[in-house]
Structure formats: C-alpha cells, structure tokens
Amino acid sequence: MKVLSRTSDNLKRCYNVLIDPEEVSNAVYGKLKQIAQKVKMHGFRPGKVPVDIIRRTYGASASVEAKKELVENMAKRVLSEEKLSFTFAAATNVVKDDENGIEFTLEFELAPAIELVDFSSIELVKRVPEITDKETNDVLNEILGHHKKWIDEPADKEVEIGNRVFVDLVTKTKIRKLKDDVASDFDFVVGDADLIEDFWKPLLGAKVSDVRELIVSYPPNALDKSLAGKTVEYSATIKKVQRATDYAVDDEFAKFLGHENIEETKEWAKSRAMAKYEYISRDLMKRDLLEKISEMFEFDVPTGMLDMEYSEVVRQLTEEARKINKKMTPEILQECRKIAEQRVRIGFVIAEVAKKEKIAVSRNEVADAVRNIAMMYPGHEKEVWDTYSKGEAVNAVVGPILELKVVNFLFDTAKTTEESCSVEKLIELDEEPFDFFKDDGPQKEITDDSVSAEAEIKDDVSVEKDAEAESDDAAEPREADEEVAAEKDAEAESDDAAEFREADEEAAAEKDAEAESDDAAELREADEEVAAEKDAEAESDDAAELREADEEVAAEKDEETEAVEHKKDARKSSKKKKSKAE
C-alpha cells in the first residue's frame, strides 16, 4: 500500500491510495479461508472444505466483501501512520480495481490544532439572587396549586366532576395476567384528564353505597399491555366522596409537607427559590465564560460539523418562530451561522481542555444520567436503557456531562467576583440573548435562495445536539435537586474527548460492516442454493453412473458364472462318455 498523492484545502484532505495486487489477493484468500472454517457443505467435515471449492461457490461475494474490508482497513492504516486527528468518519471511494491493484480516494477533515491559553485571566461576575418574600411566596403558591386538602362529603351528596371518590372495584371480565379481581378503596379524581372517560362518567350523580357498572375500552397504547385494546367490565361500589379545598399557609400545611411549623416551611421555600435562581445565575456565568473563550480563540472549524450545527440551530429557531407566529429572516439565518460556528469552536476548546486536564466522564455518571432520563418515561425504562446503550446515543449523555465538568474546572480557574442582583434583572438578562423575534418593525421574509440551508434540516439530527442545545439555551429554571443529580461526581476514568470521537468512528465502521455483512450473507445464501442444486445434480449423476457400473459388474459376474457352469457340465459329460467307453 502506498499513498499516491495528497491534496489539501484548509482543513479538508484528500489522499489517493493504491493497494498492490498481492495484498488484494491475500485479502480475498483470507476471506475464503474464513468462510471455509464456518461453512457446512455436503460430503465434508466442518472446517475441512477445500478453498478451491469455496472459491467456486462463494468467490464473487467473498471478493466483494474482502475488498471492501481491505479498503477500510487501509484507510485506517493511512490515518494512523500519518498521525492525523480528524472529525467524523473518513469517506472512501474506489476509483480503480484491476490487475494493478485497488486505487481509492480517502477524504476527511482535520480537527483544528488548538494551543490553549491561560484561563486564569478571565474575569467573571457571579450574580447572587436577592430572594424576597415574593419569591418565597411564589414557591409556596406553586405547591398549594398542586396539593389540595380533601374533606369528606355527606353520604347523600351526589358525585360531581372534581370530587375524589373511593370505590371497591370488582373486575368482571376475565384477564389472564390479573392476580386479584377486587381493588378495595381504589381512589381517583372524577374528571381527571389522565383517566379514560369510561372510568368516571358513569359515577356522576351517584351517592355513597351506590353500585355502578363500568364498561371501559382501553386504547391500544395502554401502559398495561394486558389491557391494551380490550374492553373490560367493572362493578364499582362507592364508599366515600370528598371535595377539594385549598390549604392555608399555616402549621397544618407545614406538617403536611413534613415540617414542624410554618416558619420552617418558609425557610425551606426560600432555599428552594434561592436554588432556582442560583441555577439561572450560574447559567449566565457559564454563558459569559463561553463567550469570552470564543473571543480568545480564532481558528477554522470543519465545514461538516459547522453545517450540521447550523442546521440544528435553524431547526430550533424555526420551531420557536412557528410557536409565536413569526418568520425566519435572512438576518436571523446569518446570526444562526455565527452561533453555530461559536458552538463548534467552543466544543473543540472544551475537548482540548478535557484532554489536557484529564477530565473524563465515568460510567457511573453516564448510568446516573440515563437513569434520570428513564425516570421521565414511566413504563418505558427498558426502551430508554436500550436506546442509550448504543454508541451515538451514549454520546448525547456524555457530551453535556463532560462540558459541565470542564466548565466547573474553568470556573475554579477564572477570577470570579460576586454582586447582588434582583430576580427581575436576573430573568431579564437570561432572556435577552434569545430575543430573535422582538417586534422592532416589519420582518423581511426569507426567500427560497436564502432558505436553502434551512431546507436541508433533517428531523433526525443527533440527540447529542439536542442535549447540547438544551444545556446552552437553558432559559427555563430547573429544580435544585435536578442540578445536584446532574453534577454528581463519580470516579474519573481515563477516557477523553478524542476517545469519544474514536467511538463514533468505530460505531460508523461497525454499521458499514454490518450492512456489508448482510449483503454478503444474501449473496452467500444465493450461492449456497445454487451450489446445493449443483451438488444434487452431481450426486444424481454420480448415483446413475454407479448404478450403471454395478449393473455392468453384475452382468460380467453372471457371464463368468455361466461359463464356469458350462465348463463343469462339459467335464461331467466327458467323464460319462469315458466310463461308458470303458
């Protein structure tokens, strides 16, 4: 193997590579030997089929498969020998395949070379939220809105929408997986949007001790698979009816929340409000940090990554514009390009910092993150785990965690000063950079030419971009316990950002190999069918020849037997004649 030529255009590279005929021949022969070790063929023991027979049967498919693997391996070898750091999987294209060998092109983009600077010169401002009684009361009112105090209704009070009812529920339809057909003191709120109407509508107007028959038709996508798409008949006996009232902000409400008194509850609510706005403050500080880092570095970014990130930014803003009945403009698209370039550049800097400082994401951290995601989809935890067990999906979790750890490191490195900030000002600063659609006059609608990039947006862009965008665009405050879960530190492993890129490349190579293997398998199956037919025909011909040979041998034996008998008869006749003569 040798590299015939090298061409470059900024970060883009294109190599022409030639694989000599001997290497091609060895690769094909090696593939045939692999098949010979596994194939089962009539008349031969496993692993003992001669390569020449394998070549006649599987030669075409084995040659295609071996050459494709050879090109991929040689491409990896070139990149390894050249000691190049590149982005995404390199693209190969065979341009010639003849008696002189295989010539192919290898196209890829280099990762930009980055020289890190002294980040201790960065100055950041940490805005400390000023929590007042208003923010504390907002937390309490939010909790009051989600929790009601239930008071028993008189026995003769008819059930209304909004009442909470307790029933003894008997399942009259036989369901194979149901262990117990009676549910005592089963309670629910009449009119609950999460309940099937068939479940609560027949109870309207009923009183305590009344019995109502329920015929419930479950949807095909019901969480309980044993009920999905089925119609089930129940008998419900009403035992108790309650109405909802609001809690007062007093000691009873405090005890309901698990506190000793209302003062303790208010302190707790204040700490919740502080955590909520501290998260916004931290996000603003992170935004300032990344903006300063972006200004400190000037280097070209790979066009492939830039185009992908640009498409994702446009997709997100297009959805936002649609929600508020606004239109994308050429100016907004131009701003999207700048944001995408800044994100890609910052991503490379973060990866380089992680590599230099040996900052890595442990398996425990990934598992915790996936567990938190799975908890958001009750009943579908296994599907979530299966999804995030694949290489690309795992990177959607690893990326934000790695960024968080690097940002924390840079926070500790930079010079930070604190200043008080009102909650109103904090919210205003948080929303300001994302106001792309403010009403400052008539909008100039984008033309077909200017929307060309937007038209290329794909709905199935990588989950990693969504996760990074959520991290960057965190305009909505999150709960403090979610932040703590996201920031949990576990044992660090030695993996770095470069290894994550290698994992992507390996995953892509595995996918290609699987696709290629499927094609080769189909060819092998076709070849095996043809070979089986040929073997059957050959076996039939051989059997016919053997039968003919056996018949000829039998005929010869019969003739020999007749001749021997004839001689014996002749001898007997001669003896008789002699005896008579004597």
Image (cartoon, grey):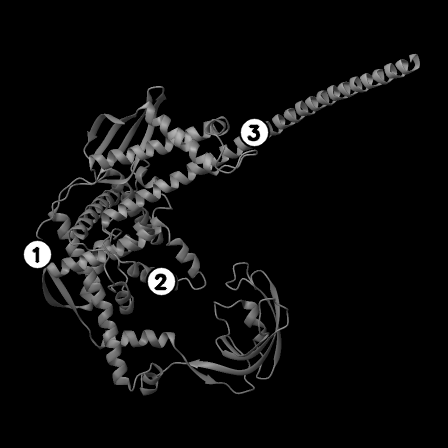
> What amino acid is labelled 3 in the image?
Val
Residue beneath the point at 47% across and 81% down: 243
Which is closer to the viewer, label 3 or label 1?
Answer: 3
Which residue position holds label 2?
A: 371
x%, y% of residue 71?
A: 33, 31
Q: Is residue 465 above or below residue 306?
A: below
User: Which residue is the extreme one toward the top?
Assistant: 581
Q: CA distance from mark 1 to mark 2?
A: 36 Å
> What amino acid is labelled 2 in the image?
Arg
Q: Is residue 335 above or below residue 68?
A: below
x%, y% of residue 572?
A: 86, 18
Which residue position holds label 1?
A: 120
Which residue position holds label 3?
A: 530
**Rendered image quadrant of residue 373:** bottom left
Instruction: Name the one closer to the observer, 229 or 262.
Output: 229
Instruction: Name the one closer to the observer, 582 or 468.
Output: 582
Q: Earlier in the sequence, mark 3 or mark 2?
A: 2
